[in-house]
Amino acid sequence: PYGAWFGGWLKRGGATVTDLVAAPGRPIGVDAVSTALATSHIDVIALVHAESASGILNPLPEIAAVCARHGKGLIVDAMSSFGAIEIDVSKSPIDAVIAASGKCIEGAPGMGFVIARQKLLENCQGNSHSLAMDLHDQWTYMQKTTQWRFTPPTHVVAAFRAALDQFKAEGGTPARGARYRKNCETLIDAMSALGLRTFLPRAVQAPVIVTFHAPGDPAYTFKAFYEKVRARGYILYPGKLTQVETFRVGCIGAIDFNEMRNVASAVAETLKEMGIKQVAPAKAANVVPA
């Protein structure tokens, strides 16, 4: 849904939007993007890199290459990938990358930022329909005064600085991404050993959050399952998908693969306590082969 929300925000801002929607459990198709750029009047592609509603990773380098070939702009929502998955703007022609202080940076949530091509930003004066979201105005004001236009979230900024120091000390994106990938792989392996099925195939799974099919057993309800796992020290995310019942488990943050094993142990104990024997999803569920 984050891609759909992205389109909704743009529509509210007065933009004409064409939605490119992938099938459930599938990334945005590179060919679909190319066809849309060739047949529709589109100036800019806005792409969610890691779609945390399901955990899917969209093919950013390939889509960036398509946009460059068609001479179109590309804005990337990297909220759930920045700091863990490489985004090389020297290789991929990206106009702007949007991210924030939380998620893979592991700072306190609450501050967004944009890394944009300066020439593009210079040409954006007067474009914004929102005072608060006017990046050009904020940028030029900070160039002149070194200040934010409005009162900044000082505690979030201080935490962001500390998080960046820790990020650098860990080894930056390669090291953090490797830790998250091990977390993700450990989680999937441990949950699969219990009989739970992932919604996504591993080939398109971002190492950020994993969506699992809910057990098909009649004894299962998410509310009871959630509360019992929570009592064991872990908080699950409800599913964001409408077509099948799922739940999600995050694998980012200041944790390692041992914590993922502990999550699976808490889930195993909960399944036993609830008397859930059919751990596999209901037959009607749309199971994507792993």
Image (tube, rainbow, N blue to C red):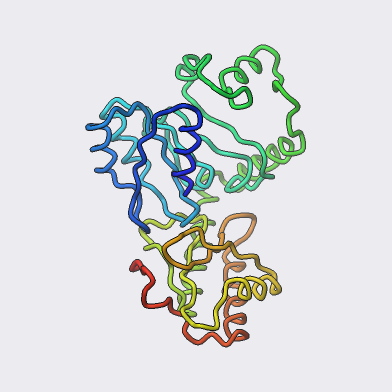
Which corner quadrant holds the C terminus? bottom left
Q: What is the quadrant of residue 284 in the picture?
A: bottom left
The picture places residue 251, in percent across and down from the top left corner, at 56, 59
Residue 209's place in the image compared with 194, above or below, is: above
Task: Identify which residue, 275 or 193, lies in the foreground.
Answer: 275
The residue furthest top is 144
Residue 188, percent across and down?
47, 68
Q: How many marks?
A: 0
Residue at x 35% of width, y 40% of height? 61
Query: What residue is shown at x 67% (from left), y 72% (from top)?
Result: 227
Instruction: Examine the rendered structure and indicate whether residue 114 appears above or below residue 144.
Output: below
Is 41 left or right of 15, judged from the image as shown? Answer: left
Q: Position of residue 103 (x, y in %)?
A: 59, 48
Residue drawn at x 45%, y 60% as measured from the top left: 242
Q: Position of residue 55 (x, y in %)?
A: 46, 56
Answer with left or right where residue 27 lies relative to residue 114: left
